[in-house]
Amino acid sequence: MAAERPDGETTERKALLDLRHISKSFGGIHALDDLSLSLHRHDVVGLVGDNGAGKSTLIKILAGAHDPTSGVIELEGRPQRLSPPAEAQRLGIETVYQDLSLVGTFNAAENFFLGREISVGKGPALFRFIRPKAMAKTAIRGLEELHIDIPGVRSKPVDRMSGGQRQLVAIARGAFWGNKLLLLDEPTAALGVRESREVLDLIGRLSARGITIVMVTHNLEHLWAVCNRVVVMRRGRKVADMPSAATTMEDVVGYITGAKEPEGTSARLREGAA
Amino acid sequence: MSADRNAAKGGETATVTAAPPATRAIVMRVLGTYGTIIVLVLMVVVFSSLRPGTFSSVGNFRNIFNDMAIGTIVAAGLTVPLVAGDFDLSIGYIASFCGLLVVGLLSAGLAIPVAILLVIAVGMAIGIVNGFIVTKIGVNAFIATLGTGTVVVGLNYAYSGGIPQQLTQSREFTDIAIGRIAGVPHLVLLMAAVLVVLWVILNRTVQGQHIKAIGVSPESARRAGVAVDRSRIVAFAIASTCAAIGGVLMASNLGSGQVTAGDGFMLTSFAAAFLGSAALKEGQFHIVGTLIGVLTVAVGNNGLAMIGAPIFTQFVFAGSLLVVAVALGGIGRRYRIG
């Protein structure tokens, strides 16, 4: 914290989160195999790979839902355990899952504060009284700050909103609570063209605010629209990690399917396997 | 030529089929949201016109509220786990057992407040056991509570030998249920108090917020950091505590502990809660809805008695109402604007 001002340059270059030689196996299955990854501030990482490549395992480790079987995680230079999810959240890491993030009958404000309600009183949840107005005010302000214009924040159940509006609410909630790292699981999967655009715009604005973003996607066009970095996974391994400006969609598809393997990476992988 | 005709026909059927679903959806939405209230108002209108002097008198409505008070307390308690998405089939048996137990404890010489608190604690404990079996062992709530309920019946028989317990104590205990304050029966006041407490819990506390979230989307709640298991256990404990309160009041009202006196609460509570889910909130369970549900059953039974309908009609009415209630609640959920 103290080093930030005089030495802004190095802070900027220092990784927010470092994963070193992370492996995760479930029984005999290696879901992740010796994966190393550094996430920096302002990174918008597009995480791609076929089904079963290890993307969701990686996301779950970052979200604190899984502990790695082996390997080291460092947050801002210090070794750090991320699980359970509440610990990751405490550290400023939020996850927006594909469908299962919002409660349909709750309005946007209630969803914003689900599990973290503003309340008066102490002790067990039964004796703590919620403050709906304070929550609505804060949620509305949070959405305004992100230039998200959704009517009925305190009156409309989110299942009466469009899919795009729901996704905006879910991501805004993640950004509201997670000031360091935001994990997005296929944020544009079920959305139309215009709604996808709005979600991608929001991701861009969040990145500009300094939040690091990792976004799992199958849509390479959406990836190129917002991500400055591409990480390709295949069979539990990271097979490519490069600036999106330095590669092409064709190459990335090649890495995903295994038709193409970058020389440096494959050599390193062979070493690792030996 | 023929293609044109087909196209015209296609267009025609399209418009014919396009209109009814819209109307149908509106009708269904109204039924799912106001169905129970419509039934209630219709009954009040019909019975009032058939028996103007007797049905629609202050005295009769005081009777209706007094008679439904204990059932309302049990049904409102059941509403809490229903909101969380869990069934509790043990409440009727808990009410029976607790009614018997309180009479037994009083006969054994315990002071009235001590006996009541002890019995309510027993009721709460059964609910916590229910919650643990459902959440920690993962037994389906329907089966789990049927099991614990049957065990409670066993406890009931072990304690009483299947023989009703007579109250040997003073009138003090029976006054709890039978007394009045300024003309308002104690039971009605107690019912109101329980309803207010449960409404506040569900709508104004963090716990209530979590219970509601779990009922709609347990996975979203879990991922948002809600203590799902603990919330469900609390919901079961609230239901069984209310069942215990109902049992105590029943014993006070009857002046004795009857072995199966509360068993019927299971069916009537479910009927009330489901009727209530078709009142105002489009298929969601809620406290005010359950009150409206109990009132609907009570008004129906009272009115049928007033017009001198034979006893069997009350059972036909109550049974049919349960089916209609579940149907209306389902319609409310299906046609919810989503």
Image (tube, rainbow, N blue to C red):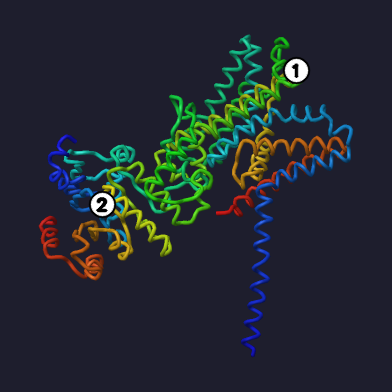
> Pointer 2: residues within 10 angstroms few (<14), some, or many (20+)?
few
**Is residue A84 toward the left or the right of residue B262 in the image?**
left
In the picture of the structure, the residue carrying the numbered disc 2 is A28
Judging from the image, mark 1 belongs to the subunit labelled: B
- In the image, is residue B119 above or below residue B169? below
Residue found 43% across the figure and 33% down from its top: A118
Per the image, label 1 sits on a secondary structure element best described as loop
> Of the residues shown, which amino acid type is indicated by label 1?
Ala
- In the image, is residue B132 above or below residue A187? above
Residue B182: which numbered mark, if any?
1
- In the image, is residue A97 above or below residue A50? above
Q: Is residue B327 at least partly visible in the picture?
A: no
Q: Position of residue B203 (x, y in %)?
A: 55, 35
- In the image, is residue B53 above or below residue A95? above
Depth check: give the residue in front, A119 or B185.
A119
Per the model, the C-alpha gap separating discs 2 and 1 is 74 Å
Do the residues at pointers 2 and 1 share their chain? no
